Image (spheres, grey):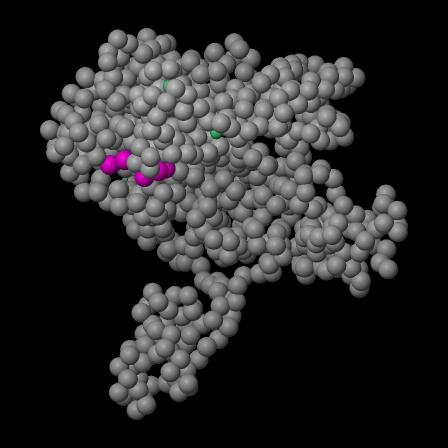
């Protein structure tokens, strides 16, 4: 039996490595970190990743099992990526095996070969002639042969259809020896002489200054925050920096938020460059994802564009990382490995020694703070490119005004006037469904979710009550389940109700709804956008799906029906999020010739943050919000970690957290860790969710190092605690949502 001991990371939540013997015939010289091995695990088999090779193991020799098979001749993970995964697991205190599972394409975790796919290529035979008598009467074969003749390097099988080549004709030609088929790698090693497929816009002075600053940082680590108002031409700056990167023979990685996946965004990159673009987002299938990952790793993709997890794409020649809409919440993963792709991107840029550019019209307070303290270079684009005017803001006090399906009288008038002037209106309401709850007018019964401390939303079109927190649904009852009366009324308004009311108020104009319910069909969103682009007056009603990245040149009025939630929420980030949302939605207005107007309905028209935001803009708001955070000792002036627990029985989660809290106090005292506060345990803001009772314990520290010292010692204890078995618990380092 082999004496070589392998330390493997296995896809398991246990934060430790597992020892195995090397498979028969595998010597030390054949092994390197990152290689995958198939191993027995209990009664199953798993695929593990080699972390290190050792001579001895703590595990008794008779308990050590041999690994079954070595899957890779060389490590599929380049060292830089492996290092990033190690860093991630360490920082988020997460099992390395599980971290690798989140970071790697699913097919690699399942043991697929880590090599570019072999492809069949169809090619015209060297001696084939178009006037071959055997195809004189077969026009389709003649045509196919002619088409192939135009592609001297052959045509890859998957693109036959695109060129109008039918498999039947090709098979007939193959039988006649007029074409050949060759199996080889898709690899095209050609590099483009001319990267630009379309001319660039001449940069204005602000853009040029930003471009030059980042350009000067090429070749070394440097972080920049590009704070550019909506429509200021951030994307144009990205595109020109990418071109510079390509010209330097390097690759560019661009992260975009999930919600920006629209074809509009991707098309801008595809249209600009003659480059090989690898796409890694939720809509690509597992095989495409692996192909894109491999192409990036092997230097066969020039530009890599993807959502959060694309951060873990290896690059052969990394040159630049861009994080678009860096403030966006979708960069933080909310389950399993709770990483923040923006924060990790900085680590990665540092490790790879390349510049990173974070862009946003509404930067996160964290990034602004980093810019203020000199960690990031701060680049402003204060004016809209192409000369469009910034939108004007109006706060509409609705304190004692009746709301008609959520829409006040003055708002209705403003909408009517805009439509009459031949322009488009965007009505924003961040709540799906018809109404947020159903109320019995007789006895006060409310449609509460049986599994959550939350109300169920009325969805009229599907005649359902639906819980947006756990997915539970049921038919809308005809009569009150409590008193049997039939006076059930929807309370409040969601997008469905606003849409219905607006259609009645403005019957001469189309009303288009954009939210997760209306756009679940694949092309629905594209059809909607096509309608909008045609430019006829219409009303768009939607949720935050409307807020991001789209360009609606004919929208001149943005109606925000409800902004108050962000002003009195218990979550300290709520006002930041609200401000970002308002500014992003507002940014859709008046991007072309006509100036835009934004009307915000509010019960808190004098709220200082709202006044600041609407009168002086996002950056003034951010300064105010930052000084409030500083005074309250909240991020970015403090560091947080949140221990969450949930259990089937009430009290269990708290009991676990109580014990965890005492343990933390003990470690803090023993190691003399200063500046750490333990807040809680307290019930989660929504105590019951999907049938489980939830509680949380917040750790707040004024420095990162002691917090991380505490956490790493603490988790070892928590993992052993018997009380932990009855509950589901997880630790969130740098939590974004405190629920
Ligand atoms: P952002 O990404 O900041 O929202 P975009 O890059 O989408 O802004 O630019 C907004 C609009 O301004 C686009 O229509 C774009 O083509 C145009 N634009 C950008 N830069 C320039 C420029 N230098 N000159 C003229 N128009 C520009
Ligand atoms: Zn009732
Ligand atoms: Zn529920």
Asked if 524 appears above or below 725 in the picture, the reply is below
Span of residues in magenta: 512-518
In the foreground, 156 or 619:
156
Left or right, 654 with respect to 31, comes to: left
| Residue at 86% over, 43% down | 58
Left or right, 504 with respect to 78, comes to: left
- Picture coordinates of residue 507 (x, y %)? 14, 32
The answer to whether one can see residue 100 in this image is yes
Q: Is residue 515 rendered magenta in the image?
A: yes
State the image quarter where residue 381 is shown: top left
Left or right, 490 with respect to 577, comes to: left
| Residue at 40% over, 70% down | 155
Look at the image and tell me in which quarter the N terminus lies.
Answer: bottom right
- Picture coordinates of residue 539 (x, y %)? 21, 32
- Picture coordinates of residue 543 (x, y %)? 34, 31
- Picture coordinates of residue 323 (x, y %)? 46, 37
> Seen from this angle, which residue lies furthest front?
484
In the foreground, 672 or 568:
568
Q: Is residue 616 rendered magenta in the image?
A: no
In the foreground, 588 or 304:
588
In the foreground, 308 or 321:
308
């Amino acid at each position: 039996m082999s004496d070589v001991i392998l330390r493997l990371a296995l896809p398991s939540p246990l934060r430790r490595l597992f020892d195995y013997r090397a498979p028969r015939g595998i010597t030390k010289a054949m092994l390197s970190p990152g290689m995958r091995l198939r191993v027995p695990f209990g009664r199953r088999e798993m695929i593990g990743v080699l972390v290190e090779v050792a001579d001895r193991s703590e595990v008794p020799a008779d308990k050590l099992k041999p690994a079954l098979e070595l899957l890779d001749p060389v490590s599929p993970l380049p060292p830089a990526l492996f290092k990033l995964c190690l860093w991630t697991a360490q920082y988020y205190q997460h099992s390395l095996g599980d971290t690798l599972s989140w970071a790697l394409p699913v097919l690699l975790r399942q043991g697929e070969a880590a090599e570019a796919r072999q492809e069949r290529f169809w090619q015209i035979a060297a001696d084939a002639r178009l006037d071959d008598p055997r195809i004189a009467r077969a026009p389709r074969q003649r045509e196919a042969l002619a088409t192939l003749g135009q592609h001297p390097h052959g045509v890859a099988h998957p693109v036959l259809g695109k060129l109008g080549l039918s498999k039947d004709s090709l098979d007939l030609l193959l039988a006649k020896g007029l074409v050949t088929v060759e199996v080889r790698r898709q690899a095209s090693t050609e590099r483009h002489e001319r990267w630009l497929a379309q001319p660039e816009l001449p940069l204005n002075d602000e853009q040029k200054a930003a471009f030059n600053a980042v350009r000067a940082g090429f070749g070394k680590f440097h972080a920049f925050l590009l704070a550019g108002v909506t429509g200021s031409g951030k994307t144009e700056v990205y595109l020109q920096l990418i071109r510079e990167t390509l010209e330097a023979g390097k690759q560019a990685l661009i992260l975009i938020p999930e919600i920006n996946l629209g074809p509009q965004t991707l098309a801008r990159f595809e249209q600009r460059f003659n480059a090989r673009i690898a796409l890694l987002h939720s809509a690509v299938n597992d095989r495409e994802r692996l192909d894109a990952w491999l192409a990036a790793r092997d230097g066969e993709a020039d530009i890599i564009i993807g959502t959060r997890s694309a951060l873990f794409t290896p690059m052969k020649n990394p040159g630049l990382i861009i994080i678009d809409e860096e403030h966006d919440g979708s960069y933080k993963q909310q389950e399993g490995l709770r990483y923040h792709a923006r924060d990790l991107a900085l680590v990665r840029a540092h490790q790879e020694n390349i510049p990173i550019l974070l862009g946003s019209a509404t930067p996160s307070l964290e990034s602004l703070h980093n810019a203020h303290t000199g960690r990031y270079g701060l680049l402003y684009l204060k004016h809209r490119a192409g000369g469009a005017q910034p939108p004007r803001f109006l706060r509409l006090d609705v304190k004692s005004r009746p709301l008609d399906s959520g829409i006040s009288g003055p708002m209705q008038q403003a909408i009517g006037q805009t439509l009459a002037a031949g322009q488009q209106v965007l009505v924003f309401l961040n709540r799906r469904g018809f109404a947020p709850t159903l109320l019995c007018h007789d006895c006060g019964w409310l449609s509460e979710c049986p599994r959550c401390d939350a109300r169920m939303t009325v969805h009229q079109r599907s005649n359902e009550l639906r819980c947006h927190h756990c997915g539970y649904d049921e038919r809308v009852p005809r009569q009150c389940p409590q008193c049997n009366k039939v006076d059930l009324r929807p309370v409040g308004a969601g997008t469905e109700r606003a849409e219905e009311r607006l259609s009645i108020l403005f019957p001469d104009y189309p009303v288009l709804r954009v939210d997760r319910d209306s756009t679940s069909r694949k092309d629905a969103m594209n059809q909607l956008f096509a309608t909008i682009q045609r430019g006829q007056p219409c009303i768009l009603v939607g949720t935050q799906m409307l807020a991001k990245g789209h360009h609606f040149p004919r929208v001149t009025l943005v109606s925000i029906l409800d902004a108050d939630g962000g002003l009195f929420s218990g979550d300290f980030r709520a006002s930041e999020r609200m401000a970002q949302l308002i500014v992003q939605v507002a940014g859709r207005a008046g991007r072309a010739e006509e100036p835009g107007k934004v009307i915000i309905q509010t019960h808190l028209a004098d709220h200082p943050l709202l006044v600041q935001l609407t009168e002086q803009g996002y950056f003034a708001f951010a300064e105010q919000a930052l000084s409030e955070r500083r005074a309250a000792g909240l991020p970015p002036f403090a560091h947080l970690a949140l221990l969450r627990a949930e259990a089937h029985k009430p009290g269990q989660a708290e009991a676990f957290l109580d014990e965890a809290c005492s343990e933390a106090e003990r470690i803090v005292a023993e190691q003399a860790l200063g500046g750490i506060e333990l807040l809680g345990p307290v019930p989660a803001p929504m105590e019951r969710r999907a049938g489980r009772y939830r509680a949380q314990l917040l750790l707040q520290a004024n420095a990162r190092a002691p917090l991380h010292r505490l956490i790493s010692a603490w988790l070892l204890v928590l993992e052993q605690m018997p009380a932990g078995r009855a509950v589901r618990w997880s630790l969130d380092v740098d939590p974004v949502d405190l629920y």
